[in-house]
Image (cartoon, rainbow, N blue to C red):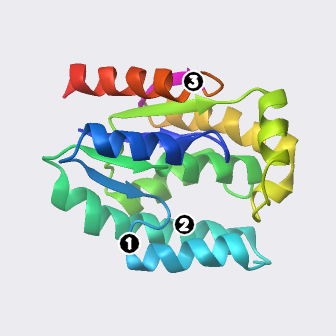
Amino acid sequence: MYVALEGIDTAGKSTQVALLRHAFSDAVITKEPGGTSLGVKIRDIVLHHELHSSKAEFLLFLADRAEHTTQIIKPNKEKLIISDRSVVSGIAYALVKGDISATALLHMNRFATDGIYPQTVFLLQLTQDELEYRLSQKKLDGIESRGISYLLSIQDALIQAAQMLEIELITINASEPVDTISRSIITHIKEHQ
């Protein structure tokens, strides 16, 4: 079973992945971008260096996704794979930018992943007020500094991307207590493994 946690920055994905690591000690835990050595470099470029081309950014993410699929997803397809972000994020961010048609996004991502997508996506969803509060509590990275309305448009696009890929989407209120969220995710995985 391959599942992914999605959500805009500060939604709590990393916290939940850490809790899932303890609940499923045999699971393969990964992330996009950054689940491979190439992905670590790509993540650094996108988050900490100014790219002048949004197409270049998109292609870097596709390169990471192809490497991630080859090195992590395919070799572990018989195991439980839990990923912090996935192809859903890649499509969502590109949809918001609007440089590439939805049809082209689907084709390019299918090419990068060989059509291998998460079975289930858990979307940790934030309200505008909660997002504003969480961002006020931290130093912003390159994506977060694009602003509240940008991040909320990404959140909407995450839903759209999951629907385009026909992936089961489970939306979770990210303002709920951390333990409540993790229990909900753990229960779903155990019931469907």
Mark 1 or mark 3, earlier in chain: 1
Q: What secondary structure predominates along the stretch shown in magenta?
A: strand
Q: Which residue is mark 2?
A: 61
Query: Dot 2: few (<14), some (14–19), or many (≥20) neighbours within 10 Å?
Result: many
What residue appears at the point 32 percent right and 35 percent down from the top-left corner?
A: 119
Q: Which residue is mark 3?
A: 177
What residue appears at the point 71 percent right and 76 percent down from the top-left corner?
A: 48
Question: Closer to us: mark 2 or mark 1?
Answer: 1
Q: Position of residue 136 (x, y in %)?
A: 85, 46
- Locate the C terminus by quadrant: top left
**166 horizontally vs 71: left or right:** right
Query: Dot 1: few (<14), some (14–19), or many (≥20) neighbours within 10 Å?
Result: many
In the image shown, does 92 or 50 lie closer to the viewer?
50
Q: Amino acid at mark 2?
A: Phe
Q: Distance of mark 2 from mark 3, alpha carbons?
A: 32 Å
Q: Please say if 5 is above or below 163.
A: below
Magenta stretch: give its range: 167-173
Is residue 170 shown to the viewer in this render? no
Q: Amino acid at mark 3?
A: Pro
Q: Distance of mark 1 from mark 3, alpha carbons?
A: 31 Å
**45 horizontally vs 136: left or right:** left
Secondary element at tag 1: loop
Secondary element at tag 3: loop
Question: Closer to us: mark 2 or mark 3?
Answer: 3
Q: Which residue is mark 1?
A: 36
Query: Dot 3: few (<14), some (14–19), or many (≥20) neighbours within 10 Å?
Result: few
**79 horizontally vs 163: left or right:** left
Residue 175 among those drawn in magenta: no
In the image shown, does 71 or 166 lie closer to the viewer?
71
Secondary element at tag 2: helix
